[in-house]
Image (spheres, helix red, strand yellow):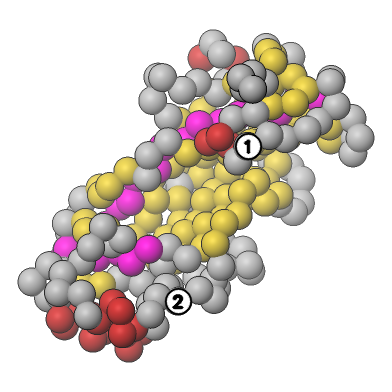
Amino acid sequence: MKAATLVLVLAVCGAVMHAQNSAAPSADVTLQMSENTPDFKPEYCLGELTEPRFEGPRRQGPDDITLQLPLKVLYQNHRPETIILPPWNHYLTRMTVVGQNGSTVLREMGNRNRRMNDNTVMALSSPNLQFTIIAGGKDGWSTGNEGVVIPVLDHSSGLDLRGKTVQIVMTRDFLSLAPDGAARLSEKWKNYGTVWTGVAESNTLTLQIPKEPETRSCIIMVAK
């Protein structure tokens, strides 16, 4: 996909995110969301698409169009001290169409009610690979290659986003530890940092969908 066919503009998100979150997003920890590496380009797919990073096969009509949008996400620590992030327990990526009310859930994973076992965690002498450590005032570990699928043209529902501007925001819920458990763990791991629990929100990613997107077949042929 040529860069001229898709304009990505990054803007700092100032909106408080959506009633579906279990808590208001924090300014202490945020997510920096951007287009992925040059190895993965946004692609407008005609008909069915199959791509593991985008949650497997999706069946559409032969003339429907979807956008496969690769993303790179960095954790950002705005606090002066080192923080320790537990595993997130809920992940949500939402899209709004500029000039229209409401939003669409593009991807949702996890369970806000899922909690780590306090006894198992407290038995750890130090943070294991489930935890992410970020120095104060720094960008932390990248979440790697991710992506969302954006429906652009769906004849069955009448959806048509061609020529429109859409905005995407991601949130991650790190409330997988109860506050008292996080406090006890922070005391035990004080040589490594402070355990942080809360909801982290991303910047807003704004995309201009072309009026006539250049499409291709995105089906991956799997040998039997």
Residue at figure coordinates x 76%, y 51% from the top left: 101
Quadrant containing the C terminus is top right
Q: Which secondary structure lies at badge 1?
A: loop
Q: Which residue is mark 1?
A: 56
Residue 163 at x, y = what percent? Answer: 73, 24
Residue at figure coordinates x 54%, y 71% from the top left: 112
Q: Which residue is mark 2?
A: 115
Kind of residue indicated by mark 1: Gly
Mark 1 vs mark 2, CA separation in Å: 27 Å
Q: Earlier in the sequence, mark 1 or mark 2?
A: 1
Q: Which secondary structure lies at badge 2?
A: loop
| Magenta stretch contains residue 185 | no
**Snapshot quadrant of residue 194:** bottom left
Does residue 50 appear to the left or right of 71 in the view shown? right
**Residue 139 drawn above or below residue 15:** above
Residue 50 at x, y = what percent? Answer: 65, 28
Residues drawn in magenta: 64-87
Marks 1,2: beta carbons within 8 A: no
**Residue 77 drawn above or below residue 63:** below
Does residue 65 appear to the left or right of 120 in the view shown? right
**Residue 4 drawn above or below residue 9:** above
Q: From this viewpoint, which residue is outermost toward the bottom?
A: 180
Labels in figure, total: 2
Does residue 160 show up? no
Does residue 74 show up? yes
Residue at figure coordinates x 58%, y 43% from the top left: 168
Residue 63 at x, y = what percent? Answer: 84, 20
Residue 178 at x, y = what percent? Answer: 39, 83
Specify the principal SS of the magenta part. strand
